[in-house]
């Protein structure tokens, strides 16, 4: 795995400053500590940092073709590079290395921009075509590898991480206020924009080209299946077909010239990968897991059970609350944006653990979105089913009266009923998008300091567009939407946290051929009653221990909500309640104070909301104020007061 950076000056008479290019490249040393390289061609410059995985001796980058008319800087793994190399050789291509980088370069020579259609794997790359004076940027189909770009002062800048674009010195760090409502609702920004004003991301399955003749063009080269394939197969036969395809995808992902390990949580997905990997490799697999001291958030016993079942050489680590928060600012810097999910932090620690043993790890990312593994899928399906009868049996006036009554119920009863069809709008916006939002739009309209961006930019616009374009029923459409929005954020987390430890993570469930097969499979094979991932469980029933097959999904829980009420409530005082934080919080100060007060009083669990606000402030201190991550976090001191001051707001926060 590697880092790529580049500068293209639109003025062909310009010359790229080597120092700028190296500054961009070297801020990403963590992504590629093994080698470094630079390519300069007047108004074009590429930089590269390498983590050597394939053809360790000869895969240096940037790489040129024989007549030096093409240059590539590339980050990723092409799992079919050997067969593609054979195909290209048959068409007259000559190779001087055994690297997949050279295969991508030759594929461009032969197929042009359509080269991406021949690649099976995860990748981002840039090619400068000297003959055509054209830049070609590409990102893999699912967005496993990230790519960012910006136009500034007559230049196009691009890189694997946002911080490299900032290191070029021409893009000012400023918050993109138009997407703040979307960030607060969903934890992330789904479209091409980012939280940085003027910095964009190339979306999955897209290519970007620039030439003087044609200017800049962006096009999509791959889509998820546009139809659901009718099937009369039994569950057993469908599972058998799935097993064949999953094993084939996994076998492809094992291509490496260095040892490969596995992130093992003890859940179905990672245990399945371990069980299928074991007979494919020599010797025991090295597996790695992470947990917490809090028993309710600790999956280590499950991971140990899985490790024993597959016969792996198992390693584990426990993250303390102190180490969790001490490293948090550094990890915000690594992710470039506020950390959406607390699970990013333990992912970094387990990546660090793996880095002392292997360079490559397998991960089960993507299976939940493909096989309807999240609880929200079945909850939404249940709500939708009952909402139809509810609308038919009760007139609107009675439904409104019941909704008002629910709002005055105590604690948990109110929360559960408000998140059901009784309290939500009965369309998919209410049942799926709003219902699982961190800060729903109704709350934002009530609490935002400046609600104008909320009215101008619908937080669910991108997701709704994917949902409306999807084939099948609502379950298939939810999966289709998450594969192109929520999952992309998770993949960014996976990439940034593993690369922070200089480890390459691979995601076999997201092999595009497997994705195309599963995404076109009817939802009835995936969700049966209350059983999620039904066809996957059936396909793996002979290799995954029964307790793991039947266990409830934990979803990598982190006990931040409890920590905020106890020893680490001082973090809320500094990063959420301080004058400095409140002065630029997107929320009204009284609303924020009431949010914290309600959480401390256990009126409602606002852990996710407080986590988001805390991370937003840390992000601003690092990227907008220029603070060094290591000095952002104040000493972790226990809270002296046992209670919290109760503050009034026009609508009680606990009612949300």
Image (tube, rainbow, N blue to C red):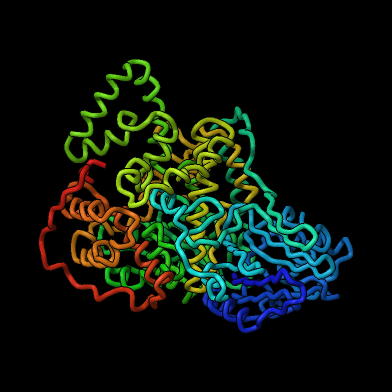
**In x, y percent, where is residue 106?**
80, 65
* Mark count: 0
| Quadrant (top left, top right, bottom left, bottom right) of the N terminus | bottom right
The residue nearer to you, when weighing 380 against 286, is 380
> Is 580 positioned to the left or the right of 150 in the image?
left
Q: Position of residue 454 (x, y in %)?
A: 42, 46
- Up-down relation of residue 478 to residue 136 (above or below): above
Residue most toward the bottom?
19
Q: Pick out the residue farthest to the left.
A: 642
Viewer-side residue, 210 vs 120: 210
- Decide: is 611 above or below 236: below
Q: Residue at x 49, y 66 (%)?
A: 496
Q: Which quadrant would residue 145 be assigned to in this image?
A: bottom right
Measuring from the top left, give residue 468's x and y in whole percent. Answer: 55, 35
Left or right: residue 640 compared with residue 91: left
Q: Is residue 601 left or right of residue 150?
A: left
> In screen coordinates, is 125 left or right of 579?
right
Residue in the picture at 76% in, 62% down: 211
Q: What residue is rendered at 69% in x and 70% in y?
A: 8
Percent x, y for residue 533? 47, 41
Q: Quadrant of the C terminus?
A: top left
Q: Is residue 212 visible?
A: yes
Question: Residue shown at 38%/65% (left/top)?
Answer: 345
Q: In the picture, residue 417 is in which quadrant? A: top left
Furthest residue toward right: 92
Residue 359 in sight: no
């Amino acid at each position: 795995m590697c880092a790529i950076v580049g500068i293209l000056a639109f003025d062909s008479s310009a010359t790229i400053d080597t120092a700028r290019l190296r500054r961009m490249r070297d801020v990403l040393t963590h992504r590629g500590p093994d080698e470094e390289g630079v390519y300069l061609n007047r108004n074009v410059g590429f930089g590269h940092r390498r983590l050597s995985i394939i053809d360790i001796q000869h895969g240096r980058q940037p790489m040129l073709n024989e007549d030096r008319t093409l240059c590539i800087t590339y980050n990723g793994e092409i799992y079919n590079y050997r067969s593609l190399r054979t195909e290209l050789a048959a068409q007259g291509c000559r190779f001087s290395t055994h690297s997949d980088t050279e295969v991508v370069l030759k594929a461009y020579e032969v197929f042009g921009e359509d080269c991406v259609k021949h690649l099976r794997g995860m990748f981002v790359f840039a090619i400068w075509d000297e003959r055509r004076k054209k830049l070609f940027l590409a990102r893999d189909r699912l967005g496993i590898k990230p790519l960012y770009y910006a136009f500034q002062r007559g230049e196009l800048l691009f890189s694997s991480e946002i911080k490299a674009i900032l290191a070029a010195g021409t893009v000012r760090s400023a918050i993109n206020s138009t997407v703040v409502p979307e960030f607060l609702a969903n934890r992330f920004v789904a479209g091409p924009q980012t939280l940085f004003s003027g910095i964009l991301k190339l979306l999955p399955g897209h290519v970007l080209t620039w030439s003087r003749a044609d200017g800049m063009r962006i096009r999509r080269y791959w889509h998820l299946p546009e139809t659901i394939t009718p099937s009369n197969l039994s569950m057993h036969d469908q599972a058998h077909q799935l097993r064949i395809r999953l094993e084939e995808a996994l076998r492809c992902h094992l291509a490496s010239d260095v040892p490969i390990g596995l992130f093992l949580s003890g859940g179905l997905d990672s245990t399945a990968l371990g069980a299928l990997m074991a007979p494919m490799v020599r010797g025991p697999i090295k597996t790695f897991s992470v947990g917490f001291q809090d028993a309710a958030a600790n999956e280590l016993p499950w991971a140990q059970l899985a490790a024993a079942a597959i016969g792996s050489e198992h390693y584990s680590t426990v993250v303390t609350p102190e180490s969790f928060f001490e490293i948090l600012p550094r990890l915000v810097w690594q992710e470039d944006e506020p950390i959406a999910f607390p699970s990013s932090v333990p992912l970094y620690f387990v990546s660090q653990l793996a880095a002392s043993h292997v360079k490559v790890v397998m991960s089960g990312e993507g299976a939940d979105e493909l096989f309807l593994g999240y609880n929200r899928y079945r909850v939404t399906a249940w709500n939708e089913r009952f909402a139809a009868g509810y609308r038919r049996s009760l007139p609107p006036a009675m439904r409104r009266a019941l909704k008002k009554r629910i709002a005055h119920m105590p604690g948990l009863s109110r929360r559960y009923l408000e998140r059901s069809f009784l309290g939500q709008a009965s369309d998919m916006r209410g049942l799926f998008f709003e219902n699982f939002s961190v800060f729903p739009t109704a709350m934002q309209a009530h609490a935002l300091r400046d609600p104008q961006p909320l009215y101008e930019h619908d937080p669910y616009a991108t997701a709704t567009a994917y949902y409306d374009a999807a084939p099948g029923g609502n379950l298939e459409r939810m999966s289709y939407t998450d594969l192109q929005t929520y999952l992309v954020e998770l993949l960014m987390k996976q990439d940034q946290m593993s690369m922070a430890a200089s480890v390459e993570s691979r995601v076999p469930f997201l092999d595009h051929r497997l994705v195309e097969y599963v995404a076109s499979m009817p939802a009835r094979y995936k969700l049966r009653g209350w059983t999620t991932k039904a066809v996957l469980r059936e396909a793996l029933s002979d290799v995954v221990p029964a307790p793991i097959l039947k266990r409830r999904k934990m979803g990598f829980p982190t006990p931040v909500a409890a920590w905020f009420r106890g020893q680490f409530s001082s973090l809320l005082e500094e990063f959420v309640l301080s004058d400095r934080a409140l002065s630029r919080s997107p929320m009204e100060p009284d609303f924020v104070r009431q949010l914290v007060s309600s959480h401390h009083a256990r009126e409602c669990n606002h852990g996710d909301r407080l986590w988001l606000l805390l991370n937003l402030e840390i992000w601003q201190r690092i990227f907008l104020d220029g603070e060094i991550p290591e000095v952002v976090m104040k000493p972790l001191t226990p809270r002296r007061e046992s209670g919290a001051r109760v503050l009034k707001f026009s609508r009680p926060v606990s009612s949300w």
